[in-house]
Amino acid sequence: MFVFCLHALLGCADELSRTLDRSDVVTSNVEIAVLEDDQVTEKDNETFFEEPVVLPVHLGPLLAPQKKEATNASSYSIGSYFPVLSDDAVASDSAVSASSSQSQSLLETAEPWSPAIVPFLDAPIDHESKSVKPLTKAEQAHESSKKEVVPAKKLAVDSHPKMPRIAILIDDLGYNRQGMDSSLMLPTEVALAILPSTPFATQTALTAQKQKRITLLHAPMENQRELKLGPGGLYAKMTEHELKATLSKDLDGLPGIQGVNNHMGSLLTTKADSMKWVMETLKGRSLFFIDSLTSPKSVAKKTAQEYGLETVSRDVFLDNIRTEQAIDKQFSRLLKLARQHGSALAIGHPYPETMAYLKKRLNHLEQDGVRLVRLSDLLTTSPSVLTPSEQ
């Protein structure tokens, strides 16, 4: 038994000797801190084993840190935890022995690593900036109104020529039903002129009014050939009172009348006094006047302009000759004048030949590059209007 214990002691001594021999080989500039018996406290014994724990050779021995007062972690540099060694630091055993005292002092002052708390870097606060409030609808409208939109200049190449316009007026309505029915079947842009005190005058006017078609009083006026005028005729021998009374009666007999044109009148339209009385009556009712231009000496349009009435003159008679070929020739002349002057007015009559031609022809105006418009679109006024003293 004694021999066995002796061998065990000898084995422990050999093992201890080999351990101390390995501890002499240092791979870094750090050397083992040897603790004396009187340096180990009871608290240290709670943390470390009495016998040192030996790590593998490439990691080095476990070092027991010394108990020191807590200091600021930021006061230690990286070099205090990981000393940098030169290539010749472990050249020989003598170099290791010479640096052992320095390494021991470093180990004695080392403290356990603790992370340094660095505050997050916030963006600088702009105390002068103000919070942006959303704009109300009224404010948005005000802001948008501040932005002035300047339209681009309109160049000559951007301007498109206006399409030539034509207007058509059918005269002499009121004597027969056939003429009334056929004229009311034409496009509503076609205006109708109705003779006063005729059998179908009122019915034609009422139907045209429902169609929202322009209707005129076709006022009978004295002609140079002394042809009969029929009821409601205006003559050159009439006094001012007689002429105005007769014209007012003719106007009152037709509902929805918007203007007047002359039936015949190759004589009366050349009389300045008679035309003044006519225009004074029409001005009091806010009606326009169309000069049928039955005489080249007519002063009707000029007088209407002097009184500030809207007016226009006839350019073409469609059916002086009642054949389709003659009517087509006159209609072609109408289109030519419209292209030359921008607009033109034609007057026709409720003849069967005229009604049949217009019914067919007016549906293909797009091919001719012209547009059928209402008679009111061609009316103009003169800039020079007579004052009451001049009248």
Image (spheres, grey):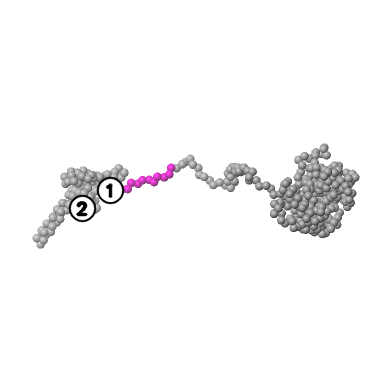
- Residue toward you, 109 or 319: 319
- Which quarter of the rendered picture does the C terminus lie within? top right
**Residue 68 visible, this angle:** no
Q: Give me the residue at 76% from left, 57% from top.
A: 359
Query: How far, Cα to Cα, is label 1 from label 2?
Result: 23 Å
How many residues crowd around disc 1 within 10 Å: few (fewer than 14), some, or many (20 or more)? few
Residue 112 numbered mark, or none: 1
Magenta: main secondary structure: loop
Give the percent coordinates (x, y) of residue 224: 88, 47
In the image, taking residue 59 as reference, residue 183 lies left or right, namely right
Left or right of 50 on screen, residue 365: right
Instruction: Kindly indicate whether the residue at mark 2 contacts the one at mark 1 (C-beta within 8 angstroms).
Output: no
Q: Which residues are magenta?
A: 114-124
Q: Nearer the viewer, residue 367 or 27?
A: 367
- Percent position of residue 388, x then y: 81, 39
Nearer the viewer's eye, disc 1 or disc 2? 2
**Farthest-out residue, top:** 389
Tell me which residue sits at (56%, 46%) in the image: 135
Q: Earlier in the sequence, mark 1 or mark 2?
A: 2
